[in-house]
Amino acid sequence: MKKLFASFMCTVVMALTVFCVPFNAQAAEYTPNVKIYADAYMLISLDDDSHPVVAQKNADKRKYPASLTKIVTAMVTLNKVKDLSQETVASKTAIESIYGTGAQVAGLKIGKSYTIEELLYLTMVYSACDACEVLAEFVSGSIPAFVDEMNSWVQSIGCKDTHFVNPDGLHDPEHYTTASDMAKITLEAMKNDVFNKISSTQQYKFGNLNLIHTNYMLDKFHITYYYQYAQGIKTGSTEEAGYCVITKASKGGYNYLAIVMDSPIEVLDGIKTKCSFIDAASLFDWAFDSLKYSTVVRKNDIAYELPVNNGKDADTVQLVVKDDVTTLVPSTLDPSNVIIQPIDAPESLEAPVTKGDFVCKADIIFAGKTIITVDLVAAKTVELSTFLKILNALKKFFTNKFVIAFLCLIILFGIAYVVVFVRRIQRDKARIAKRRREQEKLDRELYGDDDYLPPPKRR
């Protein structure tokens, strides 16, 4: 019986070991309410180091960049050439490589020397393809080697869907990028002071020529396109790429970068119009008129309240906003109408809780749209109650279904053990009584009634 009980207990303990719980003592994006003709665009705020995207469409859709490519050509050159006064000779190979392509050129002469600075201005201001070819040969020794450096550079700054086959942007099915990647490229380029100076130059005198920046938004004489707040950077167009422009604008202390790709020519007010410039101006005007920086929530604004388990002198704690949050929001926003909605808030907290502890994040919602996500922290310190912790732990332990099942098994086993034990005693008594009767009968047969002596009684 003892062996049976021991085996049963071992089985139960092993089951409890497996099944029982151990007991232990991201500024918002908006949709512009203006007509945008481009198939892909991005509008980025330059007033925040994180460069939040304010509006976008098809930003990750593969597009042909045309002469936007020249931003990368300029940057690979600037990264490798420190003395821009150096001169290089325009080779026959470089100049003749673009014969018959219809590409825009500055008229560089074979065998003539040009400074790297001149070639960069021709590349970025006038979009001269012959200048790109000469730069490529000077920087890398050959155009294919330069293109390899272009691709390596864009990959190094995080571009995911960009591939170049030439330094000037002439069309090739394998020469592509996205608005998102062009944003990465441009933001990286804007860290370079020389690039900013060259790309924002409105006019450049080259020999007897006075060359105008191809971004007509900078030129007062292009009345249809002129935009007084625009600055730089680069345009591009081919039949396959449509009309593209990357430019920035500043007004009233606000600064934006627009990337516009694959915009058409449309007849507007009876005039054939390159809609890339119109799109960029529309995006800028919408942002300047419709958005503003505003403090939407303030530090210690109450957002939520959670139960605290085992807390001393407190069974709840409030969650508050960790820091003031100032971001670009619609100019119509009223902070009193902002909703703070916790994200995946826990059902409760375990004491001890320290004031300022991070608990969860929360969406800041206005007019049904999430405009920013913030951190929520504990508003006060709640100390641990050891007594409540032990009490609740015991309660939890003894209400655990596996513990209850184990106790029930123990009780059932105890009852079964008692029943078996009692029945065994009864069988033993019956067996002893039977043996006594048989012994009495045998004694009578052997000795008769007079000689029979009953067994002595136990004292």
Image (spheres, rainbow, N blue to C red):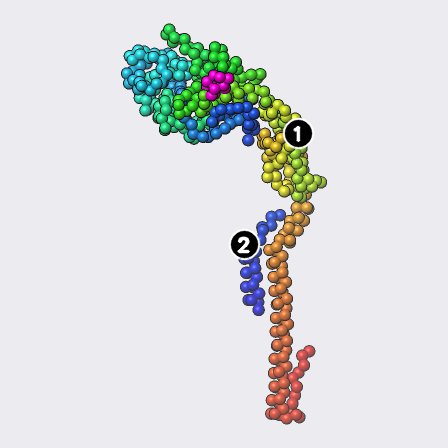
* Residue 317: % across, % down: 67, 37
* Residue 205: % across, % down: 40, 8
**What is the three-letter code of the residue carrying label 2?**
Val
**What is the three-letter code of the residue carrying label 1?**
Asn
Residue at the (49%, 12%) spot, across then down: 223
In magenta stretch: residue 338: no
Query: Closest to the observer: 385 or 115?
Result: 115
Q: Which residue is mark 2?
A: 18
Within the image, what quadrant is residue 69 found in?
top left
Relative horizontal placement of residue 98, taking residue 433 as reference (left or right): left
Magenta stretch bounds? 266-278
Cα separation, mark 2 vs mark 1, equals: 52 Å
Q: Which residue is mark 1?
A: 337
Which quadrant holds the N terminus? bottom right
Within the image, what quadrant is residue 443 found in?
bottom right
Residue 71: tell me if it is visible. no
